[in-house]
């Protein structure tokens, strides 16, 4: 096969152009904001603020595959940095259960004083949680719960059912205020096969049911902005007039908003879920249908690290009568509206 | 490559006549399916289905996956497969929406998206053509690594587009028709002309029909294959612009499962996975069938799980019909 000489003049020019384009493209991967301020939420340490005995906190979480998990890791680190006596030992996030198990085992062997674990799969990591507890290391189980309370000292997580309830209650109250009879209420759910989505939807349905309303058009997206946009574009076509819309997740909400904007629809109120900074800013601006978002805040990671420190130092929570840290803490899915958004902006996460 | 039993000369320009779409019974069947679906839509939601805004919604939903499917049609006709299209859409979308790219303005964003798509496609092509890596494996590697790179660059965050000029152009319209639909039509028209009226297109059929005969006939098969994957990559770059415009954001999750949707559309459109035969019109109808299907399901507020079952049934039916049509024609086996 008589090929052309490998580097003819044309080849040279093309090659040069390719290298130049490559260099230009490589310069386009930067992603540092011009004024990058660290504004992760941190817990006020109250009377326990003064440094106690030095401890090491081990931390393991899944890979940050969307904004919420990224915020979990970022918040945990920021909280640990607040305490001069705390050494924070975080493992690289992974979505491989085996790898996360061996990471936790490594932390156990390193004899950290307290462990904070957000398991990729609660069931799969139960055994290693128990192993840590057996080794005398208290475990704080973050959000995705282990199979048995034997595997954790304290569980802290969000409340999916109440997210739905609070979204439903807010929408019902707003519609009652406007005296809407037989309202059309839409729902953009997340991945339907996940228990968390089912719980959110059940809470939403139950709350609307108590107000005498029901869920109308419903689609399920994939927690991604693209799927949110596609599903919502069709949903809006199917419902020429909407009174309210609840979107389960603010990450996919970027796409939901884009679809609403494309359709030029404004006649309804929209409520988000999780509490991203993006949505909070839109709520504050009050120029689009989005009027509220129900929290499922990654600030729970900050709290978890603060609790881990107290556990490691044998302290209780200041204002409670209990001497010990409670065994379970469920965060509250507050409704963030234009009225109270300023006090919640600090827990809003970057989607 | 069972199709290569056909005599080599069939793979050359003489083949062209066969693809005049008006005469293809398989294509008529496919159009029939689309018409039936539209009728179902019209009957179940008569006040909504055939409205201007719903048709526009369907076409805008079809635009990105349609453009990707155009590229996929080229690759499959050339006898290959591209599993990496979705990841390339994700990577190009992320790359063109980084803060650094956005700071250079809309033109650089567009060029960046196209360049990343084209570049990844050419890497696929060089691996397949010159590295002799099986297309399935070469593009599988790109499928994994492009998605990984997209996650790396974006930090798995959703990068919102702040550039208003970019959004205004791509989310706007011209003569009352959204830009995305114009772009889709343009890509499709250019693709059709290239495939059916140029040497490049005829070579694509020839290489897919019988690569060895094409080489003997004087076609630079390696270079041609590399370029075909480049075309697919470029289409992904265009689709990335569309997805970013639609969602107003670039995310590493953009383009998820596009490879499956595109292959499904191409295959039910009558293009043979063995290469050498196929039509872009078929691909277009295939894309529209799936888009209209999900539109009808949502208009009627039905669960998406049933929609996936329907999708599967349509794929199997379409392929079975093709098989029968081919058997009837060749009379063999």
Image: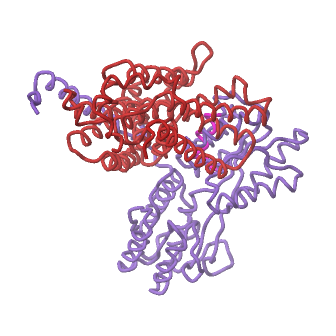
Chain colours: A purple, B red
What residue lies at 51% left-to-right and 56% top-to-bottom? A69
Estimate the x, y position of residue B188 in percent, counting from the top left.
47, 24
Left or right of B201 in this view: A160? right
Estimate the x, y position of residue A100 in percent, counting from the top left.
42, 69
What residue lies at 35% left-to-right and 78% top-to-bottom? A110
Estimate the x, y position of residue B93 in percent, counting from the top left.
44, 36
* Residue A255 is one of the magenta-drawn residues: yes
Left or right of B156 in this view: A252? right
Q: Is residue B148 above or below residue B196?
A: below
Estimate the x, y position of residue B48 in percent, counting from the top left.
76, 30
Q: Is residue A340 visible?
A: no
Q: Quadrant of residue B288?
A: top right
Q: Quadrant of the N terminus of chain A?
A: top left
How many numbered discs, if any? 0
* Residue B207 is one of the magenta-drawn residues: no
Extreme residue in the front direction:
B331
Left or right of A175 in this view: A164? left
Left or right of B86 in this view: B61? right
Nearer to the camera, A285 or B5: B5
Nearer to the camera, A334 or A269: A269
Nearer to the camera, A82 or A277: A277
Q: Is residue A17 visible?
A: yes
What residue lies at 45% left-to-right and 45% top-to-bottom? B252
Magenta: main secondary structure: helix
Q: Is residue A181 above or below residue B109?
A: below
* Magenta span of residues: A249-259
């Amino acid at each position: 096969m008589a090929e052309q000489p490998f580097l003819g003049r044309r080849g040279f020019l093309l090659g040069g152009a390719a290298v130049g384009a490559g260099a230009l493209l490589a310069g386009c991967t930067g992603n540092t904001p011009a004024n990058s301020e660290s504004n992760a939420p941190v817990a006020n340490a109250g009377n326990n603020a003064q440094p106690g005995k030095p401890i090491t906190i081990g931390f393991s979480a899944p890979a940050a595959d969307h904004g919420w998990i990224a915020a979990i890791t970022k918040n945990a680190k920021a909280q640990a940095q607040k305490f001069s006596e705390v050494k924070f030992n975080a493992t690289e996030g992974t979505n491989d259960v085996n790898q996360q198990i061996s990471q936790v085992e490594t932390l156990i062997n390193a004899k950290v004083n307290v462990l904070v674990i957000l398991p990729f799969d609660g069931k799969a990591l139960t055994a290693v949680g128990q192993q840590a507890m057996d080794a005398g290391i208290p475990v704080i189980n973050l959000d995705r719960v282990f199979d048995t309370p034997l595997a954790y000292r304290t569980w802290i997580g969000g409340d999916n059912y109440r997210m739905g309830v609070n979204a439903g209650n807010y929408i019902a109250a707003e519609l009652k205020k406007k005296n809407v009879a037989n309202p059309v209420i839409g729902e953009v759910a997340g991945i339907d096969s996940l228990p968390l989505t089912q719980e959110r939807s059940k809470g939403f349905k139950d709350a609307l049911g108590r107000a005498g309303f029901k869920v109308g058009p419903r689609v399920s997206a994939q927690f991604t902005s693209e799927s949110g946009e596609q599903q919502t574009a069709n949903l809006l076509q199917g419902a020429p007039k909407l009174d309210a819309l609840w979107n389960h997740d603010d990450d996919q909400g970027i796409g939901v908003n884009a679809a609403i904007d494309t359709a030029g629809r404004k006649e309804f109120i929209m409520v988000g879920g999780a509490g991203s900074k993006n949505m909070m800013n839109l709520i504050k601006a009050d120029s689009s249908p989005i009027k509220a978002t129900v929290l499922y805040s990654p600030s729970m990671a900050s709290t978890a690290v603060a609790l881990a420190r107290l556990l490691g130092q044998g302290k209780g929570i200041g204002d409670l009568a209990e001497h010990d840290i409670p065994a379970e803490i469920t965060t509250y899915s507050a409704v963030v509206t234009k009225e109270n958004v300023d006090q919640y902006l600090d827990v809003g996460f970057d989607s | 490559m069972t199709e290569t039993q056909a005599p080599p000369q069939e793979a050359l320009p003489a083949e062209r006549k066969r693809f005049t779409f008006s005469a293809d019974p398989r294509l008529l069947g496919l159009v029939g399916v689309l018409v039936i679906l539209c009728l179902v839509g019209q009957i179940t939601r008569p006040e909504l289905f055939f409205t201007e805004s719903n048709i526009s919604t369907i076409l805008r939903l079809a635009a990105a996956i349609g453009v990707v499917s155009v590229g996929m049609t080229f690759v499959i006709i050339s006898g290959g497969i591209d599993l990496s299209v979705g990841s390339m859409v994700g990577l190009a979308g992320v790359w063109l929406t980084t803060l650094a790219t956005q700071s250079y303005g809309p033109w650089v964003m567009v060029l960046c998206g196209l360049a990343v798509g084209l570049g990844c496609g050419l890497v696929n092509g060089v691996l397949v053509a010159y590295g002799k890596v099986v297309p399935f494996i070469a593009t599988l590697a790109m499928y994994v690594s492009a998605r990984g790179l997209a996650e790396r660059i974006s930090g798995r965050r959703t990068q919102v587009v702040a550039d208003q000029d970019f959004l205004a152009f791509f989310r706007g319209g011209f003569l009352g028709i959204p830009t995305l639909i114009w772009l889709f039509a343009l890509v499709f028209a250019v693709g059709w002309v290239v495939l059916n009226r140029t040497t490049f297109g005829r070579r694509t059929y020839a290489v897919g029909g019988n690569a060895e005969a094409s080489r003997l006939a004087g076609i630079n098969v390696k270079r041609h294959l590399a370029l075909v994957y480049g075309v697919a990559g470029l289409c992904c770059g265009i689709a990335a612009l569309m997805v970013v415009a639609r969602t107003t954001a670039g995310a590493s999750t953009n383009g998820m499962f596009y490879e499956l949707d595109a292959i499904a559309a191409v295959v039910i459109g009558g293009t043979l996975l063995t290469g050498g035969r196929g039509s872009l019109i078929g691909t277009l109808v295939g894309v529209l069938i799936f888009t209209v299907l999900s539109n009808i399901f949502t208009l009627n507020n039905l669960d998406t799980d049933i929609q996936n079952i329907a999708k599967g049934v349509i794929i199997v039916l379409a392929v079975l019909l093709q098989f029968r049509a081919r058997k009837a024609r060749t009379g063999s086996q």
